[in-house]
Image: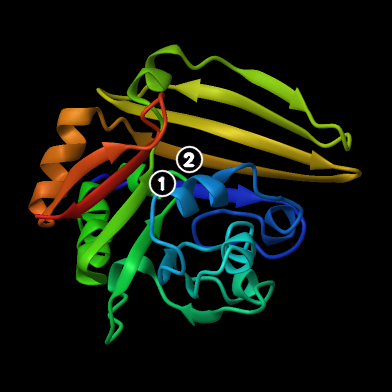
C-alpha cells in the first residue's frame, strides 16, 4: 500500500476527502460520456454510479431513460443531484442489498495508487453487478503516463485548466497538480495515480471475479467488464 497522501485540494467552498472542489465540479457538464455509456447497455438499464460527484453524468443518464443510484462519499457533492436516489458512502465499503445492470466507475478512480483500495473498488463493482450485467470503468490509456507534459487549456467560457508539477516517483506512478480557474475563483487538485496497462487491468479484474469484455473507444480509455 502507498502510505503517502494520494489526493489533496485547495480553493473556495467544500473540498471532498479526495481533494475535489465541489463548487468547481458543479460547473462541469458532460462531454459525450452519457451517450457512450448508454450505447453499451440495454435501454432502461439500471445504473449504480460510483463516485457520482455533482451529477455531471447522472442527470444525462436519467434523461436517457436509466434509473440511477448515485453514490459519493461527499454529501456536498450529492446535494447537487436531483431525480436520482443518492447514497452517501465511500465506494470501498458500499454494500447495498441489490444489484444493477450496470455498475459505473468513472473519473479514473480505478487508477488510485493504493493497490488495496483499488482492489476494494473492484470488489464493490462485482458485488453490485447483476447476473448478465456489466461494469464500465474509465482509465487513462497506458501511453498517457509516458507522454504527459504540462499543459494549459482555456474553454469557450474563459475558464482554464492547467496541469503542473508532473513527477514520476516510481514505476508506473504519476503525480501532478491540476489548477482550475473560473472567473476569480481558483482551485487545485494534486493526485498520485498508477498506470494500468491492459494485462495489469485484466489481472486485477480477475481477482474481483471480473474480466474485460471489450473496449468502448479506440483509445481503450473506456473498459467494459463482465462477471467471470
Which of 99 and 63 lies nearest the eye of the viewer? 63
Q: Nearer the viewer, residue 89 or 3?
A: 89
Q: Which residue is denoted by mark 1 in the rendering?
A: 6
The residue that appears at 44% across and 12% down in the rendered structure is 147
Classify 10 Å Cα crowding around label 2: few (below 14), some (14-19), many (20 and above): some
The answer to whether residue 183 is left or right of residue 134 is right
Separation (CA) of disc 2 from disc 1:
6 Å
Residue 31 image position (x, y, % from top left) = 64, 42
Give neighbour class at mark 1: few <14, some 14-19, many 20+ (Cα, 10 Å): some
Count of numbered circles on the image: 2
Position of residue 55 in the picture relative to residue 107 (left or right): right
The front one of 149 and 125 is: 125
Q: Quick check: 132 above or below 194?
A: below
Mark sitting earlier along the chain (2/1): 1
* Residue 193 figure quarter: top left
Look at the numbered discs 2 and 1 and tell me whether their residues touch, using CB distance below 8 Å: yes
Residue that appears at 35% across and 63% down: 102
Is 42 above or below relative to 145? below
Residue 143 location in percent, x, y? 37, 17
Residue drawn at 42 percent across, 31 percent down? 217
Task: Quickly name the residue at label 2.
Answer: 191
**In-front residue for pair 152/29:** 29
**Percent coordinates x, y for residue 213 in the rendering:** 21, 42
Amino acid at each position: 500500500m502507498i502510505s503517502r497522501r494520494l489526493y489533496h485540494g485547495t480553493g473556495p467552498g467544500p473540498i471532498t476527502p479526495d481533494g475535489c472542489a465541489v463548487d468547481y465540479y458543479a460547473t462541469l457538464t458532460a462531454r459525450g460520456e452519457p451517450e457512450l455509456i448508454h450505447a453499451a447497455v440495454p435501454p432502461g438499464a439500471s445504473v449504480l454510479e460510483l463516485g457520482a460527484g455533482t451529477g455531471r453524468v447522472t442527470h444525462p443518464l436519467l434523461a436517457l431513460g436509466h434509473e440511477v443510484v448515485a453514490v459519493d462519499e461527499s454529501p456536498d457533492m450529492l446535494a447537487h443531484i436531483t431525480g436520482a436516489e443518492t447514497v452517501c458512502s465511500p465506494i470501498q465499503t458500499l454494500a447495498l442489498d441489490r444489484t444493477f445492470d450496470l455498475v459505473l466507475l468513472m473519473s479514473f478512480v480505478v487508477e488510485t495508487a493504493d493497490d488495496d483500495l483499488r482492489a476494494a473498488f473492484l470488489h464493490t463493482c462485482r458485488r453490485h453487478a447483476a447476473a448478465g450485467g456489466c461494469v464500465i470503468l474509465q482509465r487513462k490509456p497506458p501511453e498517457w503516463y509516458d507522454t504527459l507534459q504540462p499543459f494549459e487549456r482555456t474553454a469557450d467560457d474563459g475558464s482554464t485548466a492547467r496541469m503542473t508539477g508532473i513527477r514520476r516517483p516510481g514505476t508506473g506512478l504519476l503525480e501532478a497538480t491540476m489548477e482550475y480557474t473560473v472567473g476569480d475563483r481558483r482551485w487545485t487538485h494534486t493526485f498520485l495515480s498508477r498506470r494500468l496497462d491492459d494485462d495489469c487491468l485484466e489481472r486485477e479484474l480477475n481477482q474481483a471475479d471480473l474480466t474485460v469484455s471489450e473496449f468502448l473507444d479506440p483509445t481503450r480509455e473506456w473498459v467494459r467488464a463482465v462477471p467471470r
